[in-house]
Image (cartoon, rainbow, N blue to C red):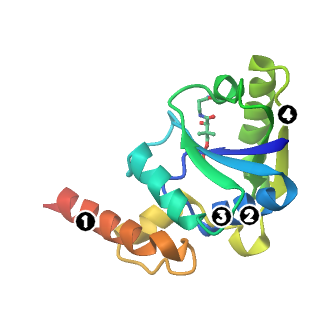
């Protein structure tokens, strides 16, 4: 059984993420969305919250499950079976970092390949960070977030801003 691993920090998951997960699920027998830590990012949601939101947003995809790990991606993939990492590539600016991570994961786990899917043009400009920024200042992010998690994300980020400015 061929398994796609879709790794990310998903803080929060965007429609761009869901698009890549859905396309991976169509190509592979099984897809595991893996919530991981990114040391370069300050997260607004706990890993458990991100997992719960991803489960709601992907519940309609029958061969998709959501898991989390606090360790290395390459190590976590060991023992998960016949896996391939699947990531979405937006603009050229994504490339350098993604290329480095793909090579490093291969170095850490010789069997691990990374497959890049070109991001859907409708979602090229979407990122979790930009969505958080817009939400925090009260902007409209409908059509950018999965509808199943839209209200929870918006409420939390607006509350976060109120707390910071008090
Ligand atoms: O969605 P992101 O934040 O771009 O995803 C990056 C992520 C979480 C996949 C990456 O930071 C990661 O793999 N973190 C787990 C720790 C790890 O394996 N780091 C080495 C990467 S080469």
Check if mark 3's residue and mark 4's residue have beta carbons within 8 Å.
no
Within-10-Å neighbours for mark 1: few <14, some 14–19, many 20+: few
Q: Which mark, residue 22? A: 2
In the depicted structure, whether residue 150 falls above or below residue 75:
below
Viewer-closest of 12 and 76: 76
- Is the CB atom of the residue marked by disc 4 within 8 angstroms of ligand 1's nearest atom? no
Identify the element where label 3 is drawn. Answer: helix
User: Which residue position holds label 1?
Assistant: 159
Q: Earlier in the sequence, mark 3 or mark 4?
A: 3
Q: Disc 3 and disc 1: Cα gap in Å?
A: 25 Å
Q: Is residue 127 left or right of residue 93?
A: left
* Res 43 visible: no
**Foreground disc of the pair 1, 4:** 4
Within-10-Å neighbours for mark 4: few <14, some 14–19, many 20+: some
Q: Disc 2 and disc 3: Cα gap in Å?
A: 6 Å
Identify the element where label 2 is drawn. Answer: helix
Check if mark 3's residue and mark 1's residue have beta carbons within 8 Å.
no
**Foreground disc of the pair 3, 1:** 3
Quadrant containing ligand 1: top right
- Is the CB atom of the residue marked by disc 3 within 8 angstroms of ligand 1's nearest atom? no
Q: Which mark, residue 113? A: 4
Q: Is residue 68 left or right of residue 95?
A: left
Q: Disc 1 and disc 4: Cα gap in Å?
A: 40 Å
Check if mark 4's residue and mark 2's residue have beta carbons within 8 Å.
no
Q: Earlier in the sequence, mark 1 or mark 2?
A: 2
Task: Identify which residue is drawn at 85% across, 44% down.
Answer: 115
Q: Is residue 142 left or right of residue 19?
A: left
């Amino acid at each position: 059984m061929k398994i796609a691993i879709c790794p990310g920090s998903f803080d929060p998951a965007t429609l761009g993420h869901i698009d890549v997960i859905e396309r991976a699920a169509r190509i592979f027998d099984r897809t595991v969305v893996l919530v991981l830590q990114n040391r370069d990012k300050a997260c607004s949601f706990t890993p458990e919250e991100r997992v719960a939101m991803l489960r709601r947003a992907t519940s309609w995809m029958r061969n998709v499950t959501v898991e989390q790990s606090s360790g290395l991606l390459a190590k976590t993939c060991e023992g998960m079976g016949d896996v391939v990492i699947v990531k979405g590539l937006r603009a050229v600016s994504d490339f350098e970092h993604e290329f480095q991570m793909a090579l490093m994961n291969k170095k850490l786990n010789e069997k691990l390949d990374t497959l890049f899917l070109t991001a859907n043009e409708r979602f090229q400009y979407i990122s979790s960070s930009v969505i958080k920024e817009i939400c925090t200042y009260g902007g409209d992010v409908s059509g950018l977030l999965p509808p199943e998690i839209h209200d929870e994300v918006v409420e939390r980020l607006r509350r976060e801003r109120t707390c910071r400015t008090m």
